[in-house]
Amino acid sequence: MKQIINDLIAQALRELEQSSQIPSELGAHIQVTPARDPGQGDFASNVALTLAKAAGMPPRALAELIVGQISAIDTIEKVEVAGPGFINFFVASATSHSIIRDVLEQGDDFGRSSHGQGGKIQVEYVSANPTGPLHVGHGRGAAIGATLANLLNFVGYEVQQEYYVNDAGRQMHILGTSVWLRYLELCGESVTFPSNGYQGDYVWDIAATLHRENDARFQKPVAEVMAEVSEDAPAGDKEKHIDDLIEKAQTLLGENEYRIVFDLALVTLVDVIRNDLHAFGVDFDCWFSERSLSDDGLIDQAIQRLQDSGNVYEQDGAQWFRSTDFGDEKDRVVRRENGQTTYFASDIAYHMNKFDRGFGRVINIWGADHHGYIPRVKASLTALGYDADNLEVELVQFANLFENGNKISMSTRSGEFVTLRQLREDVGLDAARFFYVMRKTEQHMDFDLDLAREQSNDNPVYYLQYAHARICSVRRQCAEKGISLVTGEANLERLENTHEQALVKQLSIFPERVEAAALRREPHLVVNYLRELANLFHSWYNAHQFIVDDVELRDARMALASAISQVLRNGLKLMGVSAPETM
């Protein structure tokens, strides 16, 4: 219907231009939105307000000209000018009711569109360092990323979901060394564990596996391990201390033996993360290894391309990318004086690889603390000859966990945190997925465990699922009573009360809300829509009987109820949330 109205306005403007009543080539951007007030029609357009200045006349006068030029069609009951120049459209009741048939006929595909025309989009999200199990902070990025990928696919894009495995950075070496030190303890060595090591129980578990499978193969005397290692905090520098221990592990074990320890820690935790995400309803198409960037020569290739274009210079033995030439606040080192490439150099190579794989648009979902990385990554893409606007970064604010009104403190390094698995097992998959996408990504989120556990209308996901279950219950009651429903051929003109009119209108805007959520990268818009739909349904259910003696009215109401349940299912599925038939 929005497209029909858009075309009517466009045609009216063309005819006004041809008759010289308005200047030609105004460059109209026609916007049609659902009307907020039922008394002001079904749809509204502000086109007269946006074009008034260019047309050289008051907005209301222009609106009246446009309305006078709009051709009468069966699907539009009337068109009128309101306020300073809004144009309100009233859809014919028979046309508005037809949305129910559309929903029932299209089923799971209702709301789907071909807007994306098969364009290739990559969505990279979570990408947490595999230095421990995923915690509740990672859960928000996982839920938002998966929902956004579902939305983009639903509106016609070819979407690839990717997890970037940071398997080559310093944090992984800290993990590997932490596992080795715990292993030494299991071998009987008396080790003073570093304050900056990973201290969670999972480190002990990996060390136990290493010991069980290899016995004393990797054992070294603790005196040899600690020889010439700088002092730990508080008297010393904890960063220098852990770096010295990493170097000692690599030296004493040798490259091959150290790699066995390192890879056991890596593979174990990547498997844990993969399994936890699968149980959370998130499965990635690609797990991309950071280490492969170096192994495949992509980092050197990226730096060479920047050098060839004159965007790298040498200073103090290091190679610097001229990031300031492209809007960054300072130039960035890509290769240190010792010949080692930086983490930023890996980022450059990784994003070069993304676009070289043929993605028209790349979406990164990062934590809000990565805000400063955006200008430098975009700068590198521009320098490499890509359109940096094709990289989008959605920043996700942290999620704070609350129980009994108190915030739960967490520390990943000390191992004191609530894992994503624990959250899912506590409140359930549906509540976890739903609560994470309830707010805008850039808004801080307080996750209320007590509310998520509640089975009451105060719990928003329960409220939605209960609407779906109520409809299924009515259908079961009909079957138990031997009532044969004929919803596909129901006389929908019998849906006359204000509750039913509001619900029909709400159903009609589902495709628009889904498309807006996808294109604006705002999954919470679907949440808001479904809450509005559920609220309208519960009000209708409480005010009217469905199983009535009037067969025509009964079938019409059940057709509407069936359409509502279908849209609830479609919307919940986009968020990875179930639509139970009983509760």
Image (cartoon, rainbow, N blue to C red):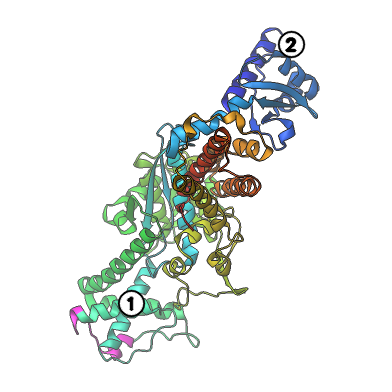
Amino acid residing under circle 2: Gln
Q: Is residue 89 above or below residue 579?
A: above
Q: Which amino acid type is marked by label 1?
A: Thr
Query: In the depicted view, which residue is nearer to us: 539 or 334?
Result: 539
Please name the residue that numbered disc 2 is placed on. Answer: 21
Which residues are the magenta region?
A: 213-227
- Mark 2 or 1, closer to the camera: 2
Q: Quadrant of residue 7?
A: top right
Other-residue count near label 2 (Cα within 10 Å), few / some / many at <14 / 14–19 / ≥20: few
From the viewer's perspective, is residue 271 above or below residue 71? below
Q: Is residue 321 visible?
A: no
Residue depicted at 67% across the width and 8% down the height: 18
Q: Is residue 21 visible?
A: yes
Q: How many marks?
A: 2
Q: Which x, y percent locates residue 74?
A: 61, 17
The image quadrant that residue 177 belongs to is bottom left
* Residue at screen point 43% across, 44% down: 310
Please give the name of the residue rendered at 26% of the width and 74% of the height, measured from the top-left corner.
261
Whether residue 226 is in magenta: the answer is yes
**Left or right of residue 147: residue 443:** right
